Image (cartoon, rainbow, N blue to C red):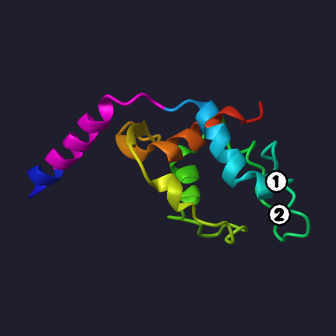
C-alpha cells in the first residue's frame, strides 16, 4: 500500500514536471478578479468593500516574517483549508483557483506538492508584492 501511494505521488509530480511555473503577472490578473474588492489594488486591505468591515481585510504586503514568505500558510488561507484564529474568517473560498492543471510547488518544506496552477500563480503574485 505504501508503495502505491508513493507511486501515485511520483506520477503526479512527473505529470506536472513538463508544465512551466506561473509568473507573478498571471497571479496579478487573478488578484484583480478575486481579491481587489476587499484587499484593494495595492493589497493593503483598502478595497472598496473594506469600508466598515470589522475586522479589516489583511494587508497582503506584510505577510513575510523574518525574510520568509509563508507559502503553506498563505495557500491554506486562500483555499479555505485553515482559517483558524484569523480575524477575517469571512473570506470566501475560491473554488476556481483549485481547478485546472497542477504545477510542482515547494511550499517551504522542500517537498514538491502538486498545486493548481491558478493558486500557484496567485501565490507568486502575493510573494512579489511583499514590502521590504
Residue indicated by mark 1: 45
Residue at x-position 66% and y-position 41%:
29
From the viewer's side, name the closer residue of 110 and 27.
27
- In the rendered image, residue 56 lying in the magenta stretch gets the answer no
**CB of mark 1 within 8 Å of CB of mark 2?**
yes
Residue 68 visible in rendering: no
Quadrant in the picture for residue 131: top right
Quadrant in the picture for residue 94: bottom right
Residue indicated by mark 2: 56
From the viewer's side, name the closer residue of 39 and 72.
39
Which element carries disc 1, helix, strand or loop?
loop
Residue 50 visible in rendering: yes
Q: CA distance from mark 1 to mark 2?
A: 7 Å
- Please report the bounds of the magenta region as a residue range: 6-21
Query: Quarter of the image containing the N terminus?
Result: bottom left
Query: Quarter of the image containing the C terminus?
Result: top right
Relative to 127, 100 lies left or right: left
Residue at x-position 52% and y-position 47%:
119
Q: Where's residue 63, x and y in %?
A: 69, 45
Q: Where's residue 12, x and y in %?
A: 25, 43
Quadrant in the picture for residue 61: top right
Q: Earlier in the sequence, mark 1 or mark 2?
A: 1
Relative to 128, 59 lies left or right: right
Which element carries disc 2, helix, strand or loop?
loop
Query: Quick check: 95 above or below 119?
Result: below
Neighbor class of circle 1 (other Cα within 10 Å; few <14, some 14-19, many 20+) is many
Amino acid at each position: 500500500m505504501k508503495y502505491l501511494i508513493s507511486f501515485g505521488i511520483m506520477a503526479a509530480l512527473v505529470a506536472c514536471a513538463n508544465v512551466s511555473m506561473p509568473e507573478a503577472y498571471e497571479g496579478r490578473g487573478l488578484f484583480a478578479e478575486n481579491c481587489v474588492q476587499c484587499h484593494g489594488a495595492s493589497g493593503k486591505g483598502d478595497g472598496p468593500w473594506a469600508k466598515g468591515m470589522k475586522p479589516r481585510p489583511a494587508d497582503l504586503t506584510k505577510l513575510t516574517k523574518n525574510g520568509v514568505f509563508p507559502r503553506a500558510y498563505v495557500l491554506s488561507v486562500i483555499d479555505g483549508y485553515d482559517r483558524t484564529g484569523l480575524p477575517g474568517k469571512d473570506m470566501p473560498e475560491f473554488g476556481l483557483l483549485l481547478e485546472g492543471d497542477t504545477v510542482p510547488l515547494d511550499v517551504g518544506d522542500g517537498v514538491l506538492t502538486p498545486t493548481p496552477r491558478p493558486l500557484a500563480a496567485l501565490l507568486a503574485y502575493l510573494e512579489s508584492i511583499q514590502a521590504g
